[in-house]
Amino acid sequence: MQPPPAGQTRTQICRWHHYASLAELSQSATRRIQQSARHAIGSKGRFSIVLAGGSTPRKVYELLRDADTDWSRWQVYFGDERCLPADHPERNSRMAAQAWLAHVAIPPAQIHIIPAELGPQRAAAAYAKVIESVAEFDLVLLGLGEDGHTASLFPGREWGAAPGSPPVLAVLDAPKPPPQRVSLSATRLSRAGAVMFLVSGAGKRQTVVDWRAGKSIPAVSIAPSGGVDVFSDVETNLP
Ligand code: 6PG
């Protein structure tokens, strides 16, 4: 096993779950999210979840519309956002609203959108205040880019993996458009009871191989004490 990325104190523990299709992956991930919500609501009366952007989680979000749960107990956060107008079709918050959040009874005050329309620095400062009171998220959902990025933590840029890193990063030059983004740091995303990566698409094969071989990609910087679960439909021929 390789050492963790620079400054990171904990090595990532990673459990891989392989599925034959995005549909199967999505059904399984949706069940896992519901289990996590049931457990948190049953034990402490509330459930905090951090949402992933990108296109892979859309199916999961659609399936969650039919979840049998007390929506009034959910607190929804976002792991990253693109600095675009609030109603822009490429906003992660808009995708989540269209696919899921606009269809269920979560009180609007419990859906904590990153105000990325304010620009990266102002939005990062504002969101740091929003998440300040959450010691640990119950569940964090993340995606994986073909270059190994997760949330808006990109190769060759700051990941916020070292202890003492700020909770929220202003991203000014992301290689994936738009260049201006806001992202929770690796340290903050790792303060979670559970972390699930949703990974789909043949174009991510080499990235998954690299990740499993211990290469230092941003996804490796997410290292909660309980490890991460990767739900993937990417065929690698690895056991
Ligand atoms: C974003 C993301 C990003 C995404 C991955 C995977 O805003 O783009 O949050 O980290 O999750 O790029 O995206 P896909 O699911 O579309 O492959």
Image (cartoon, helix red, strand yellow):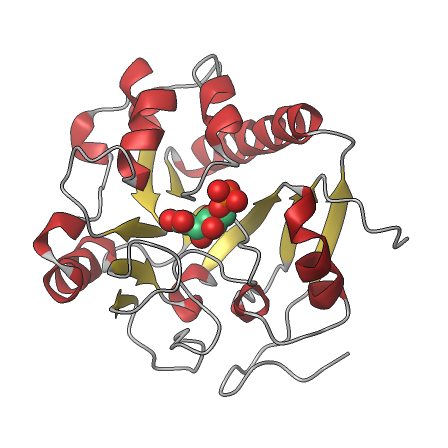
Horizontal relation, residue 116 to residue 48: left or right:
left
Horizontal relation, residue 45 to residue 222: left or right:
left
Question: Which residue is depicted at the point 24% across and 69% down?
Answer: 172
163 over 224 or under it: above or below:
below
Picture coordinates of residue 208, whole percent (x, y): 70, 57
Picture coordinates of residue 32, whole percent (x, y): 61, 33
Question: Which residue is depicted at the point 56% across and 81% down?
Answer: 5
Which residue is nearer to you in this view: 225 or 203? 203
Which residue is nearer to you in this view: 158 or 205? 205
Quadrant assignment, res 191? bottom left
Asked if residue 105 shows in the view, the reply is no
Picture coordinates of residue 46, whole percent (x, y): 37, 35
177 over 13 or under it: above or below:
above
Horizontal relation, residue 88 to residue 235: left or right:
left
Q: Quadrant of the N terminus?
A: bottom right
154 over 92 or under it: above or below:
below
Question: Which residue is depicted at the point 64% across and 69% down?
Answer: 12
Which residue is nearer to you in this view: 150 or 191? 150
Picture coordinates of residue 198, whole percent (x, y): 58, 43
Question: Which residue is depicted at the point 33% across and 52% down?
Answer: 80
Asked if residue 80 shows in the view, the reply is yes
Quadrant assignment, res 127? bottom left
Total labels drawn: 0
